Amino acid sequence: MTLLRPLTVLCSLLAATTLAKPLYKPRTQSIQWGPCDLPSLNTRPIECGSILVPLDYTNPFSNETLKLALIKSPAVVPLSPKKSILFNFGGPGYEAMQTLNGIADTLHNMTGGRHDLIAFDPRGTANTLRFTCFANQTERTLANAKYPLLAASSEGDLTRIVANSHAVSNLCAEAHAPNDLTTRPSIPTLIGTSFVARDLMQVVDALGEDGLLRFWGISYGSLLGATAAAMFPARISRLVLDGVVNAHNYYHHAGVDITQLLSTDSAFRAILASCLSAGPSRCALASLNSTSAADLEKTLLDLAESFSRQPLVTSNPTGIITKSLLLELYFIIVKYPSGVIPTAFSLFYDLLQDRTDHPERVNNLYNALQGSVSTGDNDALLGILCADKGYDKVATSADDIREDFTAMRETTALFGDIAGAVVTMCAGWKFRAKERFQGFATDVTATTKKIKTKEAAVLFVGNTYDPVTPVVSAKNMSGWFEGSVVLERNGFGHASIAQRSDCTTGIFREYFVNGTLPRQGTVCEVDESLF
């Protein structure tokens, strides 16, 4: 996820240099690894452990701590071990322990099998200082229905949605109102990215290896990795930033990267072109009388528009097929295409043919996909984004965010409603992270000093048709880091795990094992088709 807004040249790397000074007294501890409470989902066993980190890094007088639960998938080749690799899988707000447990085999294969793979659930997520604004999922669903943040298709909608954002922010503020009986800081002030970067370094210290960070960050994890590198450049060994967030945009705008959808339309159209090339036997929509991707795009947009005029109530389970739902569904399958698109396109074909059972099946697909990409029954995405955002004041009216709103909507003709809504999420937020990172403050073209990591330079990775982190963001972020290289993958979906690529796997192994970077300008093909 991502966001944006310009500041002055003076803050660029000076803030990052200041932040590199520890705000905490390093803790002498080690990790005691043992059995986990959850079964391994891979071919190899997993181990679990924990460490204590400072609750508030800005308060040197506090002894309050936070327990970080850790999970480890031990190296596949233990006789020639390398140092551990840490992971963050995105969001912000995604848990990490279950994800590592689920895909450790894939990650071992891509990194060479000689490293222990380690993850922890970041602040605000899962059971780590869990951030939530509602007592249960029912309350959250009711609030979403009462104060919707989607369908921002006009200036009038913007005014209404900013008001809705303020209402949601007020509910969160009430849920985290100060308690007179305790002096403990409020949770939403403790879950910002700077604190998580410091948590990463605490884990590195506790591992007792060489004191250097090896890290693979996906999506928001790329922002976390870039932040850690800017704060602690002398402590970075290997850094893969994958599905790259534009940190300048994220930290200095409305709490979202307003350029993150630059590739969304081209990705959608390329998928439609692939459908036509695959033919009716592999892609149902190719059976229509569409002679081009543009024709097929119009057919699907007209289908969505038809439900704007007349939404359809479904049963089993009850739901409503609307224009907004279909556009969200189009967007999700572009982001996570592997294994989903043939089924989805078959359902869209049936919906176009007025199959009587089809609305229920479309609704079921939407619910299943939404559930698979949800951060669960917490509000960490909102809490972390808004705690980090660059606006120093609460947006009191639509005018305060209109510039970012307009800029983001203009990046996509197809998904402008979704794009505009993202900008409004933090409009009325009442909380600020106790430490807000101020680096990456200028446009990269104005950068006069680059960040130099200690060992291997940073490897940035981007897909040609990534709908939420365009490869141009990887190229922009690379400009901040001395000697860094951008690897482009000529494929679809979000980040490198969206489609298998032997070329990418070979490069990752060489980088993590030997620190070897590919040549600048390298483009990897993928080895997994959409249809």
Image (tube, rainbow, N blue to C red):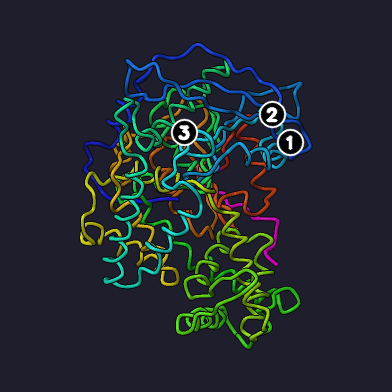
Q: Residues within 10 Å of mark 3 (few under 14, many from 20)?
A: many
Q: Is residue 427 magenta?
A: no
Circle 1/circle 3 CB separation < 8 Å? no
**Mark 1 crowd level (few <14, some 14–19, many ≥20, 10 Å Cα):** some
Task: Examine the structure image and report whether residue 530 is included in the region drawn in magenta.
Answer: yes
Alpha carbon distance from label 3 to label 2: 20 Å
* The C terminus, quarter of image: bottom right
Tag 1: amino acid? Ser
Above or below for 357 versus 458: below
Asked if residue 263 is positioned above or below residue 38 in the image, the reply reads: below
Tag 2–tag 1 contact (CB < 8 Å): yes
* Of marks 1 and 3, the one in the foreground: 3
Identify which residue is drawn at 79% across, 37% down. 43
The reply, left or right, for residue 239 in relation to residue 398 is right
Q: Is most of the magenta stretch helix, strand or loop?
A: loop
Front residue of 33/76: it is 33
| Label drawn at residue 511 | none
Q: In x, y percent, where is residue 509? A: 66, 36
User: Which residue is labeled 1 in the image?
Assistant: 40
Q: What numbered label is drawn on residue 36? A: 2
- The amino acid beneath tag 2 is Cys
Image: magenta residue range: 519-531
Disc 2 or disc 1, which is closer to the eye?
2
First reached walking from the N terminus: tag 3 or tag 2: 2
**Disc ID at residue 129:** 3
Three-letter code, disc 3: Leu
- Relative to 148, is 318 on the left or the right? right
